[in-house]
Image (cartoon, rainbow, N blue to C red):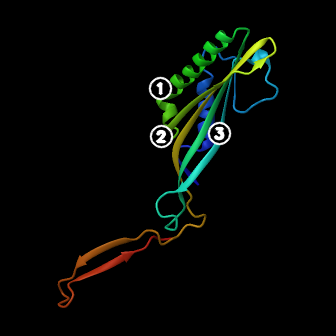
Amino acid sequence: MTYYPCSPIEIRDGTYERLLAITGLKSVAKTYTKPIKEYNLPLAVVYNAGERTSPMGDANAGQPKFDHRLSLIIDIIAADTSDLNVDADIVTFVEAVKMTLLSDTSWLELFEAVEHVDVSYSYPKDGEDYIAQGQIEFELFFRSMWPPLTPNDFREATVKTKVNKSLHDNPVYTEIFLPKS
């Protein structure tokens, strides 16, 4: 298989690397590690939440080729003793993530397009502290091709045309050169 430009795991890992540079995040993870400890907050977690694949062009013609829409999610979790502070923190971190990723051309080169960005917030109360979670969902577009495992030796041919003036009825003939195996 050949992904253009990168596979879903490479996109997730590339996103993780860029999130490490955001000031104020105490930890960044590629998957949820349970339980979440307060000393790790604010925390960012990046993961692939799903992928929708559809055939590119005619599904029955040639090798399988697909358009992919990857749901890449970044959860940010923060805590504070004040609901106003935790609200400001979580919104600030969400905006920092969007600014970091969407202005990074090397991140944008990991796939072909950003099709959607959805942001949501939740504020569950946990004892003495207020916990906030901001979730950013990127829908990313890229393609893949799945060439056959056994190559077809007759996929290419060179056609050469020459004029033969000694033939009266058909002055043109064609030679076909097949690739050598």
Image vertical order of residue 50 relative to residue 13, above or below = below
**SS label for mark 3:** strand
Residue 100: give x, y in percent of width and height: 53, 23
The answer to whether residue 39 is left or right of residue 142 is right
Residue 177: give x, y in percent of width and height: 39, 74
Q: Is residue 5 visible?
A: no
Q: Amino acid at mark 1?
A: Ser
The answer to whether residue 173 is left or right of residue 166 is right
- Residue located beneath label 3 in the image: 48
- Quarter of the image for residue 73 reads top right
Front residue of this view, candidates 131 and 113: 131
Q: Count neighbours of disc 1 (C-alpha within 10 A) and say few if under 14, some if 14 to 19, many if 20 or more.
A: few
**SS label for mark 2:** strand
- Residue located beneath label 1 in the image: 103
Residue 13: give x, y in percent of width and height: 63, 34
Q: Which mark is residue 33?
A: none
Name the residue at 61% across, 37% down.
72
Q: Amino acid at mark 2?
A: Ala
CA distance for labels 2 and 3: 16 Å
Q: Is residue 36 visible?
A: yes
Name the residue at 58% across, 43% down.
70
Marked residue nearer the N-terminal end (2 or 1): 1
Marked residue nearer the N-terminal end (1 or 3): 3
- Quarter of the image for residue 147 reads bottom right
Residue 16: give x, y in percent of width and height: 63, 29
